[in-house]
Structure formats: C-alpha cells, structure tokens
Amino acid sequence: MDSNKKYWKGLEELNKTPEFVEKNKHEFAEPIPVEEVLEGGSLFGKTPRRDFLKALGFGVGAVTLAACQKVPVHKSIPYLIKPEEITPGVANYYSSSYDGHAILVKTREGRPIKIEGNPNDLLSKGGLSGQAQASVLDLYDSNRTQNPKQDGAEVDWDSIDSFIKGELSAIKAGGKKIAIVTSTINSPSTLAVIADFIAAYPTAKHITYDAVSYTGIIQANQNSFGKAVLPHYNFDQADVIVSFGADFLGTWISPTEFIGQYVKNRNNKSLQSKKMSRHIQFESGMSNTGSNADVRIPIKPSEEGIALINLYNAISGTTLPGSKKLDNLPAENAIAVAAAELKAAKGKALVVAGSNDVAIQTLVNSINSLLGAYGTIIDLDNASNQFAGNDAEFVELVSDMNNGAVDAVFFLDANPAYDYHNPNAIKAALKKVRLRVSFARNNEETAALCNIIAPNHYYLESWGDSNSLAGYYTVVQPTINPVYNTRQAETSLLAWSNGTFKEYYAYVRDNWDKKLLALGGLTGLKGWETLLQTGYVKGADKTATAYTTNHDLTAAAQIILAHSAELAAGKVELQLYQSIAMRDGKRANNPWLQELPDPVSKVTWENFAALSPVYAKSLGLEQGDVIKITANGYTIALPVLLQPGQAQGTISVAVGYGRTLAGPVGENVGQNAFPFNTFRNGAFIGTAVATIEKTDDQSELAQTQTHHSYEGRNSIIRETTFTEYKKNPYAASGHFDEHKTYSMWDEYDHPTFNWVMAIDLNACTGCGACVVACSAENNIPVVGKDEVRRRREMHWIRIDRYYSFNKGGDLITKESEINQLSDANMDNVSVVYQPMLCQHCDHAPCETVCPVLATVHSSEGLNMMAYNRCIGTRYCANNCPYKVRRFNWFNYWNDARFDNYLQGEHTQLVLNPDVVTRFRGVMEKCSMCIQRIQAGKLKAKMEKRSVKDGDIKVACQQTCPANAIIFGNVNDPNSEVAQALKSERTYYVLEELNTQPGVGYQVKVRNRTELEA
Amino acid sequence: MRNISLIFKQFSKAVLLTAGFAILGFSAHAQGDATKGEALFKANCTTCHKIESQLIGPALGPLVTAETDDKWLIKWVQNNQALIAAKDPKALKIYNQFNQQGMTVFGSLSDADVTNILAYIRADWKTQQAAAPAAGAPGASGATADSGPSSLVIWGLLGVIVVAFIVIMVLNKVIGTLERLLLRGKGIILEDEVETEDGVAKVPVDKMAGLKHLAKNKKFIFFVILCGTIACGSWTWVTLWNTNVHTGYQPEQPIHFPHDLHAGVMKIDCQYCHSGAYKSKNATIPSLNICMNCHKVVKQDSKEIQKIYAALGYDPKTQKYDSTKSRPIQWVRVHNLPDLVYFNHSQHVKVGGIKCQTCHGPVQTMKEIYQYSPLTMKWCVQCHKRTEVDFSKAGHKGNAYYDNMIAVHDRIKRGEKVTEASMGGIECGKCHY
C-alpha cells in the first residue's frame, strides 16, 4: 500500500487560499525590499544620485576610521583560588530534581546551562518536558525580585525578620488565623518546616492551592475507596485506554511519565512483538493526547458526563437513573464500541477523565473498578504526591479573609491573584489581612498585593527534596550561588518560627539522616554524599491492592446530568485547557516556552479561541477575527483559530496566558482565561456556558503550521493501520517502491563514523520538548511574535503536524474526494506528528548550490555549516526540499529591536559556550549537535577506547520522553540506530529525490479496527 | 658624486677607528681568563646569581661591568661580611639595597679565580648585550616568516624596480644622445644647445626645463605610476593579510612573570601551572593558589610576588588570607582565538602528544610571553595537512580509538603517510560550530 493519503498542515493549505498560494510561491515569505529602493526614480533622479555618492563616501570614510581603532585588549581573569572540582572548559553535572523528576544539571564554570533528565529517574527515565528544559533560563531572569521588600521599598533581611517576628507574635497574641498558601508541596523537608511553623504559631494552617487542581480525583477516591489520594497511573499496563478529555500525554498530572508508559505499548519494540495498545479519546478541543489517539470522537463538554454514564451502563449492564441517549450519534456508537472493547480487555483496560468534577471522577472510579484496573493500572497504595490541592479549603480561606478572620497570609509558589477564578475577590480579601508575605521570585500579581516580599531561591540555588511518588525521594541541591539577594523560603520560615535550625541545609540533612537515607540503605555523611551523586532513593513499593467500589452513583449521576443540562442550555460551551508550552502560566516570562509552537494549533506567543471551521462558518467568523467571549460575567477578546476536530458548538481557550505582572516577556501575552473557572461541588470546574460577540478587530495569529511548505509533495508522511501492519510489516513503508534514481555526484565515503538518526513516528507524541532542548543546547534565538508571523522562527527542529480525513474507515486518498466530503468530516480528522530537522543528506541539494562552499559534507555523514563562510545568498534554503534551513535576518544577540535572551545581561549566561551565536545574514540549521559528537569522540580518545554506542546523545534525543529519536553511528551494525533503521517500517522522507537522507522515519501505525464514526 | 663617496669613506674610517679603540678599551679591562671563569662561575655563583637578571642576588652583568675597581670586587667576593663590618660605604650601599641579605663568603677563591670570574661575567654580558637588539624583536621576524610575502621578497622587488629605473634612465640618455647626434647630422640644432652657446648662464631655467621635459615623458610617467601602484598594492596586500594577525603581540602584563625563569631555568613543567591543557579545551591561566604553592616561601620580598599577595589579600607576616581584600588579577590575553572557532588543548596535548612549544614557541626563553604563531586558519590547516600522524608516538600508541581509523587508512592509503587532514581534520565542522 503506497502512501497516497492526502495530508495537509492547515486549512489554508487544504483550501488553497490565495494568500497561502502567494506566500508559498517564494522560499521567503517577505522579499527584501529591493524594488522599493529601486522604484520612484531613486537611482535616476538628480539629487538621489548625489546623495547616494555622499552616503557612499561618508560610509567608506566612516568605516575606514572605525577600522583604524586598535584591536581591543582582552583580559583573562583566572580564579584567585580555583575550586578543585572546576576546570574551565569542562562541564560538571550535578544531580538534582525538578518537579519531582530526578535531573542532571550541566554547569560550566559554575553556572547551570542545561537541564537533562536523569536516566535513572523513576518517572520519566531520562526524558524531560519542554517546561523542565526551559526552567534553566528562568534562573537568570533579570525580572526576578533581587532584594527583599517591605511595602515596595528594598530592605535587608534582618529588618524583614524583625518586622515579621514582631507581627507574628502580635498576631499570635490576638489569636486570629494565619494561612500558609502554597501550591502542591511534596518535599518532606518543606512540609516539616511548615509543620514546625504551625507548631510555633498554632493558629496557622497550611492550605494547598493549585491553579489547575485535581481535587476532583482526590475527593472521588475518598468517596469511592475512602482514600483521599491522587493515584499513580500505569498506562503501560493498559491495552485499551479510553480517555474523556484527559490530556495525559500533554498536561494531565504527570505527562512526561505517562508518555513513556504509553509509548511502551506502541513503539517499534512493541510492534515487532505484534502488540499495540488501543486508545480512544472523547474530547471537545483537539488536545495533544486526542491527536495521538487511534480514534478520536469530538464531544461537547455537556455530553461528556452523559457519555460516561452511558459507558458505565454499557459495562455494568445496569441503567443509572436519568440516563439518556446522546444526540451525537457517532459518539453514541463509539461509546458502545468502546464499552465492548473495554469489557473484552478486562484487567487491561483503563478509563480516565480530565474533568475536575467529583461526580464525574466518582463515576470513572466505578467504571475502572468494574474493569478491574485497580491494583495494576491504577495504584492507590503507592499514590502520587504530584498534586494535592484542596479547592474548598482555599475558597474558605478567601471568605475567612473577607470576614477579617485572617491576620497573616504567606504565599509560596501560589499566585491566586492571577489564577483564582475570581481575582477581584482575592484583591478585596487581601486588603483585610494585616500581614501579607509573598515568597515569590518574580514580581507577580499576588506579590504586588503583599506588604512583604521575601524572595525565594530558585530551585537551582536551593537545597531541598521532593517526593513525587510514594517511596520515591529525590534531592535538590544548589548548582550556583544565589544570583540575587534572595533567601530560601524554608530558611525564612525557620527564622520566623524560632526553631533550632538556622539554615535549611542543616534541616534537610537532619531530616534525611533521621528518616529518608535509610530507605535507600544509606547512612551518615557517606550516605548523604552518595545521595548527592545518585539523586534519589527508592523505598520498597507497597503491594497494590485491587480495590473495588460499590459506591452508589445515583447522586453523582444527578449532579452530572444537572450540570450537563446547564451547559447544554447555552449556545456555546466553553472549555478551558492547559497549553503544553504555558501550562498554568507560572513560566510565562520564559521566551523559549512562549515561542514553542503549540503541538496541535502551532500557535506561538498567545492564546486564542479555538472553534470548529464549520461552526465558525455558521457564525460568519474567519481565522484571526477577534471575538469577545463572555462567561460567568467575565469577558475577554481573543482571535479565532479554526481548529479541525473541535466539537461543534464549543470553544476552547488555554489558561496560562494574560499575565499582567510576570516580566517583559510574559506580560500581556494573550488573555487570562482562569476567571472562566467556576467553583462547583468543592472543586474548580473549567467548563462554562459562554456567549460570543464578533468585533471588528482582526489579529493575525503567529502560527507556524504552514510555514515551510513541501509544495504539495506527498511522500512525507507514511501511515498504516495495525491490521495492515500485522499482515505485512512493510505496509506503507514504500520499501519495495521502485524509484528511478539519478545522481550527478559521487558517493561519499564514511570510513569511520556515519552519524544518522531514526525517528519513530509511532512513538513521537509531538510534545515539543525536543524543540526547547535544542534551543537550550544550540543557543537558538527567540524572534518574537512579529517575526514568527513573518515566518522567521529559528528552531532547528520543528514538529510538523499533519491532518488527514477519515471517512467510514477508509482513508481519503484523492484530492477530488476531499471536495465531496461533507462539512461534518472536518470533525473527524486524524493527526500525525513528524519531527523535522536537517536530514543530513548524502546528496544534499543545499551543498551543491552554495557558491562559497559554506555548507559541505563531512566524512562522518554530516552536513556541515560554516557560519563565517556563509555570505547569505540563501540558495541553500531555496534548494532544500525539507525546508529546514533558517536564515538570520537580524543580529538577535545585539539588535536593540529585539528583547532577546541572547542579549540580556543575565540571561545570556545560559548560552552554551561550545556553540557560537550566529551573525546576521547567515544560514543556520541542525548540526546534529556536532559539539556533542566532537566532545564524545574526544572523551573516547582521551580514555583510549573506541566510541561506544550511546556515548553521544544529541539534545533532542536526550530529552525525548518517548525515546522516539535514536541517534548513532550506523557503521556499527550493533548500534541502537542501526537496529532501529533495520525495522520494516523505516522510510526516508522524499526518498524518490535520491537525496539519501541521514534521518530515517518509521511508519505511523494506527490501531484502527472496525470502530468508525 | 665623488664628494659624497669621499665623505662616506672618511666617515666610515672614523667609525671603524672609534669602534676599534672602543673594543681595545674594553678588552683592556678584562685581563683574566674567561673560560676558567665560566667554570668557576657555574660552580659557585649560579645558585644565587644570573648575569642578565636578578635571581636571589642582583644581576651581575651590569653591576660588574659598571664597577671597575677589581680589587674591591675581589675583596667583596672573598669576604663581603668583612667589608660590611668595616663599614665600607660601597659595601653598605649594596647590603642595604638588597634588604640586608648577606652574600655567602667565598674564602676559598683566590684573587686570580675571582679575576677570571669577573672576566667571564664581563665578556658574557657584552655578548648578551650585542645579541639583545637582534633578539629584541623576535616577533617581527616571526611575523615576516609566516605572513604573506617575506621582507626579502619585498626588498628584492624594490631592488629590481630601482635597477629597472636606472636602466631606463641610462637608455633614455643614450637614446637622447643618439637622437641629438642624428639631428645634428641633419643640421638641426636644438634650442637648449643654442641657448648654451649664447653663453648665458641659465642653470635654474635648465633645471626647470629638465623637470618639465621629464613630466612630458610618457614613459617616465607610466613608470612612476607603475611603481606607485606596485608599492601601494603590495603594502595593502601585506596589511590586509596581516589584519588581526598578532604574531609577536607582547603586551605588558600586570605581574612581570618570567617564563624563562620558571620554564627555562627552573624547568617547571608547563602543565604544573597550565593544568587544563591536559583535560580541557582551555589550557587555563593558573589560579593564584598555584603560585602560592612555591611563593608562600620563595622570594617573598619581590615586588612582583607582593602583587600576588595583594591580589589574594594575603599577609606574609601573619600568613593569613583576608578575602575581603582580594581582587582578581587581570592578565592581558595574548593568544586570542575568535569565538567562531572551537579549539581544544587536550585534543592536541594529550591525544596528539604535541609539545606546547610547537605552537607557543620557545616559551622557556621568553622574559615576557608573546604570541609566537600567527594563529590563522591557514596556519592551522597547514599543520593539519603537513604533519604526519605518528601512530607509534606516545599520544596514539595503544589508543584503541584509532584502531578503526588505522585499519581504514591502511586500506585507503596503502602505506602512504597519514596526516590529520586525511582523517577528516580539515573539515569545516570539526572546528566551526
């Protein structure tokens, strides 16, 4: 079966809009304005010619004068007393922990420059999310609060301490409440510090408040099993996964971990043993997880609860009171099929729901109990500590503050003034609190309302620990001296509670000595030092019990049905979601994340209102039209994005944008959607009835999806079904296709190494972590929204997202068929992700057209790029069929028009000193992390051994939580990459052009059987 | 012309005579046997003295040359303590000048021995001084050696131009005379000749006429322009080639660190201080704690060592560090590669087994460090192309990394010489990323 399925990247490409056609005529969307200069008689008029000569003369003179200056004298300043472990030029790695994941922090000359996953990490096995990769840049954020502040004035720590101690003892005497508001803390030492503080001030209470909370699941487990915990999910144990709006590969609970688990049943290894999990997703907006699903059914938020009730009915064989059929026929059919499949895979089947509604989660618990998922797939005994937010407690605190019952409030990693559903209530309530202390690192919305700001260390400057999973303890150790005059929040709390410990480090040591080191069989100083090297200890797992529940669901069903009816009563149903780049918006000031294209929409630098193209057409809306969305009495204006696959009559908006105080990068980017949340039944719910109002405004989205066109060539993506694959593993790989290939060039010899890459399209979930890792490793400039609109983003690796239509189980192959499709098919699209980077072709079209030999081939199979040789003709980019070359339109590192991290006094400290920053007017592209290859070879030479497979890992491969990218030397037949490329599914993009790419892809396989909408 | 040559002859005679007398005068001074003196000097004095520079004791060359009273010097060498005790003014002055550090008493040396030593010191100092101007600009010779056309070529060209000019002048003259003869034969008399025959002395007019005549001579004009173009062109060419090439760059450093003493005389291994060269891309400038390994004790009183103490906030009396007073030393960077190129010392020093001197020059003789090699890409590539990789050498022998490489190259090259270039060492991406 040849791949002649029709793929398209965006609606403009599908519909061939005149604008799209015009822009894709040229390699570069905007030509250099040569014509403008030449027109208007500029060169022919009398005066301009003289002016030109004057300017020329002046220019030459000025340049000559400027060149006459002496060569600047460079200073070389060695250490006075060099720390023993530092050798300038050699990187040190320290184990630490990010968000409960064990990580390795790469430091050069004492400054952290890159975060890498610890290969032994229990959760993500060395993979890391884009957020974790980007976190290193936030260390150098010059917008961090640099000194403690009292009422806006910078003061020293001693006066802060004496002031707070005085206030606290007065409050203690008064007997009013003290609240410590934090986001979820799973650090045992921090929790102990808070407990000590509460012991010193008995009216104090620790309230956990998460911007995006999982209270629903925790409460539901309390209802169903009497255990108020967030369970640990093991997706690798599930053969059938049915998800109702849970974006578990993108944002739900622990996505980096879940990607690894999920892919385990879908990657090359699994396929070769003829095994592949099945994943059905019901959701409103197209999420990253939904786009990876084998079958995806768009449903409205109001239909989600009913669908779950029907699924429960189908599985249990009973009928819950009030059950009714869905109006949505395809969804109703899909429920029946899903129920059958789940029942068939009993014990290996899992249902998850993304909703924070306790009733829905209670229902899901009952379904999973019927399916026998507890004890294997869902582990309640070794629970996850990643989220512990209790929404009701925080709501109660706000009303307490309003009543004047609270005299002191401390905010640690919590920013309710931005992400609470009613920010004005927070503002009003805080006015009535006597002592308001924020530990915020940045001047953020909540900190601005506090009278004391005691800036906390960043995690890379801190001591600490975390316990993301029961029994799994990771350590946090500082990798740099504090950049600013900050103090760790725990140290502050210790100081204010007059404990025995003055330094938090001593406290952590003590805590580990007494309680935790023994878990890993370690003791004393030696044990502590071992811990600092390994980064974690893991106690023995408890035996997971196969819980069952007989919880009465009548009440839950009533709540669900009532809420559904409420939602369905309105015209438009609004659904909030987290974008993969921004998540809850805490890292809004991070330019790497702002410029990371959203996996599905490919939009950067803002949030938007996602509408189905068909629905938008019925409302008379087009892409980029700004609409006013009103719900719960709150209104924001957002540009429209036409999102294929979005459920009709729904609108999806990402939270995490619209920060008003975050720093120059993140402020006023997009609009804040958190206030659309509602508080129902003890939890924050992200669905609402909305009204839409069209405005006259237009706003072009900075969307990268149709940049870099393949000019309609259609052998980019190859896809098959699992059924086909089982029949013929070579299915769709084009393996036996006959191409007549012509070559004008000699074959290259790769005598020693031949560096190549294998990318498994079936493993890649499109999360974008590789893009951020590449930016961090290769000093890639951030260009900003306007430049992205001009198609000038600089990412060396991009993730192309392709849509294709499905119709009744057949794949749409012909363009003519597309025109015959009804509008409803726009709902039913499937998505394939493809990481695209320089293919390091052996017969590289770019090399032959370079007039100055700036890009040439190496004996190791790499396509090299010598920046200082490049004169910027851009012929190479024109001639590259993969469109992976990026042109430097500006000196991003010193152009005052760009507020770039490359030029910030502090932020530029994150640059990798082994990679040069590129100059204006030169091309750049993926170098296959040649600095890592060279370093790996040198290490082998120094150790007098040959290069071992796995010695050298490129940045994108290293961070990939799905292990979708494998890099290595194909000359070594035993190397992982050589083995991977032997897979029957391997194909090369645009193979027929005989460019002989060095990057092999493996055919996407979808587990589709009889179920179709 | 004759006048000039006469003057020149007389002048050179005078110079020669003066020089001769001067040499005689100097040699009259040294009556001892310098060869014997050398042996004695090395046996007795070198522990504390050097001829050209201060070691523990003062530099002897200038001192002994300036002091002509040999008898006093003999007394001083044989027993300086006695002189000091006797409150000899000269002796006291020296004693105080060198921090009242007494010199060892050499009672065993006879008067003749000391005379021999003095003779050796004076002779050696003189030869050193004579050699100094030549050695003073080692950078300049280095620059011409490897940066475009050498000075020999330039001077050669200029010589050719001058000779050509003279030949053309002579030919012009000959042609003029012949033409005149020809014209005279035809009975035509030229104007200027007529004027001279008039007997009116118009010498200045004649000169102007000559210049005008010259200015009208197209061949001459062409020649001048040609010469000018060649001169300017070659100057531009050489200048452009050498833009940003800083061979011989020898800035003054904040601390006068003599490499010749440390690496040359004391024979301290380069890597003792530049320890990064073995393990890092940077050879690293040593941090001051390395200096302190020795200089906590050695030469505490030297002005230069005091600078180290000041930088560290170290008090030699109490032997305590005060970090509040410390401030880094800002060395002036001599070897400065542009950011666009990646260079790794350990690759060359540890793996390649290349001596430091190959690129950095005779550091062990440098009083102040200077840039020996041009550090241009041409220079890098030339070495990578020309230097044969010797797989029997320390760096490569038994290095399993090259097992693959050798097999491959044996096959490809069939015993031909293997250079870095043939292993891919001049590919762009090896250094530029």
Image: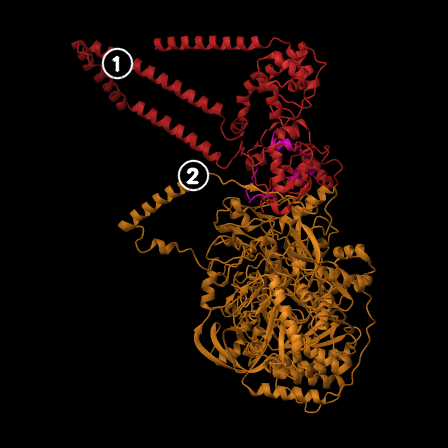
Chain colours: A orange, B red
Mark 1 is surrounded, within 10 Å at the Cα level, by few (under 14), some (14 to 19) or many (20 or more) other residues, namely few
In-image side of A150 versus B86 (left or right): left
Q: Position of residue B287 (x, y in %)?
A: 65, 41
Q: Amino acid at mark 1?
A: Glu
In-image side of A752 versus A471 (left or right): left
* Residue visible at 53% across and 10% down in the picture: B23
* Residue annotated with mark 1: B179
Q: How many marks?
A: 2
Q: Under tag 2, what secondary structure?
A: loop
Mark 1 vs mark 2: in front: 2
Chain letter for mark 1: B
Q: Under tag 1, what secondary structure?
A: helix
Q: Position of residue B147 (x, y in %)?
A: 51, 31
The quarter of the image holding the N terminus of chain B is top left
Q: Position of residue B269 (x, y in %)?
A: 69, 32
Question: Which residue occupies the foreground of this view, A310 or A630?
Answer: A630
Above or below: residue A336 compared with residue A739:
below
Q: Of the numbered discs in the image, which one, if any, rests on residue A68?
A: 2
Residue A529 sits inside the magenta stretch: no
Residue A446 placement: quadrant: bottom right
